[in-house]
């Protein structure tokens, strides 16, 4: 079923403008934009101009061989292979100009070879063998040695982290903690504080992985005694959402309910009371998580596996999710407008904790395909919604959010 496809690149100037705006949220004051983004984007333009504006691409509808319990890897690689900005970045070898290390980016090279195989115009129906890529990955992350089934979300986290380390635009060695923490009562406005923390992050960690997948979470503590608010900001590469319990009146839940539960105000009291920086003692408080900075690619992990005292349980509650226009505005900063995301890939987990199988579903130029190791088949939109949905990949569509 391969069809010819190509990357969409209408006008290079428009593309640069859009990508700067979308990926990085260009700000009037320009305080927290990655400095190398302009350089990278210009390099991209030159490369694009070089390569006649379009990469010749196959359909991408190519399977991956299972090389020994590697369905978790195959499913995640197919989702990443359908992450267009990442795919194009790899296929144009942009990382070679971008990286700030003399070390060979072995994992990135092998990952790119897998993508080249998947998007090869002349590949036809033959599958791609990810064995060499997995081998190099296991050398970087010995935790994945052996042949047992692994968790797809863990694999995704380790993979993105390892790729990031290889192609970081910053020298990781010269990491310095500049200055000391700001005095507690000498803080700027919330958004400025968040921007400052983000800039600090980019000073150390800056890569296409950060450009695409990283967002910023805000955790705010509210003291019930003095009403003081304090905030901490953390970088995230995926949102791991709890799934509400199934009840008799509710046999299926919505993604929105999972997000509500994630962002729900939590009461901290007694031995869990945090230190209030104004009262200077532990006080009864509430805590709430919100999204301060939205990533371009939002990875949502439906946390189906929960640890009980003696074992791991899997929740098989069906979670329904929108394919288009997932609006996360209400989980963002107070005055942010709507923030819309469209689904482009998902990773499914079928079976039990011990005997499971991973597959992927990815949006194509027309319709959707299911990737089950070496087997690629068409599926309908209705088939996407199931109790097996495990990791959802959304891309930011537009945002009226205050930047
Ligand atoms: Zn207080």
Image: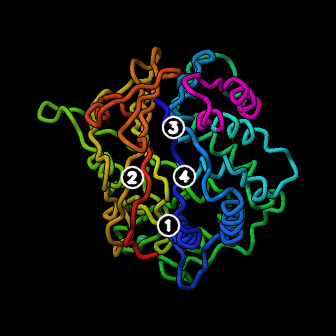
Dot 4 lies on which element?
A: loop
Q: Earlier in the sequence, mark 1 or mark 4?
A: 4
Which residue is label 3 attached to? 59
Q: Position of residue 278 (x, y in %)?
A: 48, 75
Q: Which mark is residue 22?
A: 1
Query: Which mark's residue is nearer the viewer, 2 or 1?
Result: 1
Q: Is residue 194 visible?
A: no
Dot 3 lies on which element?
A: loop
Compute the Cα span from label 1 to label 4. Answer: 17 Å
**Magenta span of residues:** 116-141
Query: Which mark's residue is nearer the viewer, 3 or 2?
Result: 3
Cβ at disc 2 under 8 Å from ligand 1: no
Tag 2 and tag 1, C-beta contact below 8 Å: no
Q: Which mark is residue 270?
A: 2
Residue at 44 percent of width and 54 percent of height: 395
Q: On the picture, is 328 further left or further right than 30?
A: left
Q: Residues within 10 Å of mark 1 (few under 14, many from 20)?
A: some
Q: Is residue 123 magenta?
A: yes
Residue at 71 percent of width and 70 percent of height: 39
Q: Is residue 248 above or below residue 350?
A: below
Residue at 56 percent of width and 70 percent of height: 20
Dot 2 lies on which element?
A: helix
Q: Is residue 201 above or below residue 17?
A: above
Which residue is label 4 attached to? 7
Q: Quadrant of residue 64?
A: top right
Q: Quadrant of ligand 1?
A: bottom left
Q: Earlier in the sequence, mark 2 or mark 4?
A: 4
Q: Is residue 97 visible?
A: yes
Front in this rendered view, residue 288 or 339: 339
Query: Which mark's residue is nearer the viewer, 1 or 4?
Result: 4
Q: Position of residue 393 (x, y in %)?
A: 44, 45
Dot 1 lies on which element?
A: helix
């Amino acid at each position: 079923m391969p069809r010819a496809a190509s990357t969409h690149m209408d006008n290079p100037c428009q593309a640069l403008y859009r990508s700067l705006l979308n990926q990085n949220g260009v700000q009037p004051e320009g305080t927290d934009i990655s400095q190398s983004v302009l350089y990278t984007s210009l390099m991209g333009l030159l490369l694009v101009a070089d390569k006649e504006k379009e990469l010749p691409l196959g359909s991408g509808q190519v399977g991956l061989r299972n090389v020994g319990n590697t369905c978790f890897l195959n499913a995640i690689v197919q989702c990443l292979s359908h992450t267009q900005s990442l795919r194009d970045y790899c296929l144009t070898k942009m990382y070679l100009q971008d990286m700030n290390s003399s070390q060979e980016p072995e994992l990135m090279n092998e990952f790119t070879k897998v993508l080249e195989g998947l998007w090869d115009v002349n590949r036809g129906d033959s599958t791609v063998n990810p064995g060499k890529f997995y081998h190099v990955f296991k050398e970087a992350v010995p935790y994945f040695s052996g042949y047992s089934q692994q968790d797809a979300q863990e694999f995704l986290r380790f993979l993105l982290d390892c790729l990031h380390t290889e192609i970081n635009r910053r020298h990781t060695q010269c990491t310095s903690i500049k200055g000391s923490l700001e005095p507690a009562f000498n803080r700027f406005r919330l958004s400025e504080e968040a921007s400052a923390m983000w800039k600090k992050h980019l000073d150390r960690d800056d890569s296409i992985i950060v450009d695409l997948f990283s967002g910023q979470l805000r955790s705010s503590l509210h003291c019930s005694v003095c009403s003081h608010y304090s905030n901490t900001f953390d970088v995230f590469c995926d949102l791991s959402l709890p799934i509400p319990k199934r009840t008799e009146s509710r046999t299926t839940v919505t993604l929105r309910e999972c997000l509500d539960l994630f962002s729900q105000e939590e009461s901290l009291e007694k031995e869990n009371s945090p230190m209030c920086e104004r009262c200077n003692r532990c006080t009864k408080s509430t805590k709430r998580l919100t999204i301060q900075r939205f990533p371009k690619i939002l990875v949502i992990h439906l946390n189906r596996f929960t640890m009980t005292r003696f074992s791991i349980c899997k929740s098989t509650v069906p979670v329904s999710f929108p394919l288009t226009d997932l609006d996360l505005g209400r989980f963002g900063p107070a005055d942010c407008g709507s923030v819309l995301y469209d689904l482009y890939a998902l990773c499914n987990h079928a079976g039990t904790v011990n005997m499971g199988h991973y597959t992927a579903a990815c949006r194509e130029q027309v319709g959707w395909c299911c990737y089950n190791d070496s087997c690629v088949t068409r599926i309908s939109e209705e088939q996407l919604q199931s109790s097996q949905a495990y990791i959802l990949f959304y891309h930011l569509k537009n945002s009226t959010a205050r930047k």
